[in-house]
Image: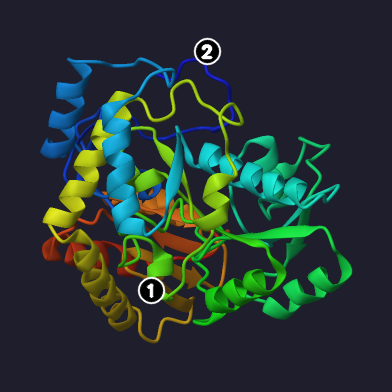
Amino acid sequence: MTSDALMSNYGTRALTLVKGEGAWVWDDQGKRYLDALSGIAVCGLGHAHPAVTAAISEQAGQLLHCSNLYNIRTQEQLADQLQAVSGMDKMFFGNSGAEANEAAIKLARLHGNHKKIDIPTIIVTENSFHGRTLATLTATGNRKVQAGFEPLVRGFARAPYDDVQAIETIAANNQSVVAIMVEPIQGEGGVRIPDADYLGQLRALCNANDWLLILDEIQTASGRTGSFFHYQQHGIYPDVVTIAKGLGNGMPIGACLARGPAAELMQAGSHGSTFGGNPVACAAAQATLRTIEQEQLVQRAASLGEDLLSRFETALEGCDLVRDIRGAGLMIGIELEHDCAGLVAQAAEAGLLINVTAGNVIRLLPPLIFSDEQASQLVQILAPLIRGFTPED
């Protein structure tokens, strides 16, 4: 039964999930589903992972919260882990991807104000998604997300994704630009993967103009695309990078990491969060990072992702409905010729959880612990549904 005490912003939800184990979840009717969505790229270790469960339980029995008025040991340990895996210098912890991106936007504003720029402007891209706070939804390139929340925040200029020339044109006509904020791969925008030299060209532009390069890796980090951060596949470092989703394997936590001069912009009193970096969330994230390393799940995501792409290409060969199959690691998009939201319910009926984004792109984000057998099941369930789908469904 759905409570009428909840706001209706999520619309009607058909399933009530009550239990999870590994890559499987169960609803309140006892039906089992193969989870190829991972809570939207959150549960990279699957559900009820024993290492994460133990870390949460142990820390909750010691200290649940104390606020950032005091040193938090698990927060400092997690910062050291992230520093080592990222090559970044310093970080701020929040509770979500939106908070991490807000911190990144504030860093860009500080950078611009230090340069005496009246309206520091961040170049963002079309079809992007950066969050639902007022600043992050303004940065987001989706009018549906923004509709009804005007007036939006000043200080953003928009360019087409994967179009460096368009950014150069904006820069030539706007002397207030202080940063570029971009997703290495657009998730909500339809698993859109830019040209291989895109991030490198953006890095060069930022170097030439004293801009910050801000990478939103909320969805692509934590091993999802076959490296811990996606930028590591391109031989560059951003000035600022954000992470959330898979960082805590289900515990709410996000972080904004900075490098070089950008890491020194925040000073005492300039930003904060009551719950950000709390002991339990950081303990969960520590356990998540340790498990990713110990079980070599970054490498697993890379190899299994290639295998899944190959399997889908074979299973869907000659299917006129399929426009493209693309992905990086375990972030896979199957683009169809028509809108296909109806496939979500059809897949659930068949015991599979998927997602459709950008109207016509099936987005697959299975956990990094997905087995070969589960990968086969995913293809065996989904490929026939795609072949048999009609736009009227």
Residue 19 spot, x, y in % from top left? 21, 31
Mark-to-mark CA distance, 1 and 2: 46 Å
Q: Are marks 1 and 2 in contact (CB under 8 Å)?
A: no
Label 1 vs label 2, nearer the camera: 1
Rendered-image quadrant of the N terminus: top left
In the image, is residue 94 above or below residue 357? above
Residue 45 spot, x, y in % from top left? 21, 48
Residue to which mark 1 is pinned: 233
Judge by depth and name the residue closer to the eye, 277 or 315.
277
Q: Quadrant of residue 358?
A: bottom right
Judge by depth and name the residue closer to the eye, 72 or 198.
72
Residue 171 spot, x, y in % from top left? 80, 69
Give the colour scheme shown. Answer: rainbow
Mark closer to the chain start, 1 or 2: 2
**375 relative to 282 in the view: left or right:** left
**51 relative to 349 in the view: left or right:** left
Q: Residue at x 61, y 76 (%)?
A: 204
Residue to which mark 2 is pinned: 5
Q: Does residue 33 appear in this view? A: no
Disc 2 crowd rating (10 Å Cα; few below 14, some 14-19, many 20+) is few
Under circle 2, the secondary element is loop
Under circle 1, the secondary element is helix
In the image, is residue 99 above or below residue 57? below
Q: Residue at x 52, y 12 (%)?
A: 5
**Residue type at mark 1?**
Gln
Q: Residue at x 33, y 81 (%)?
A: 313
The residue sitting at the bottom extreme is 318
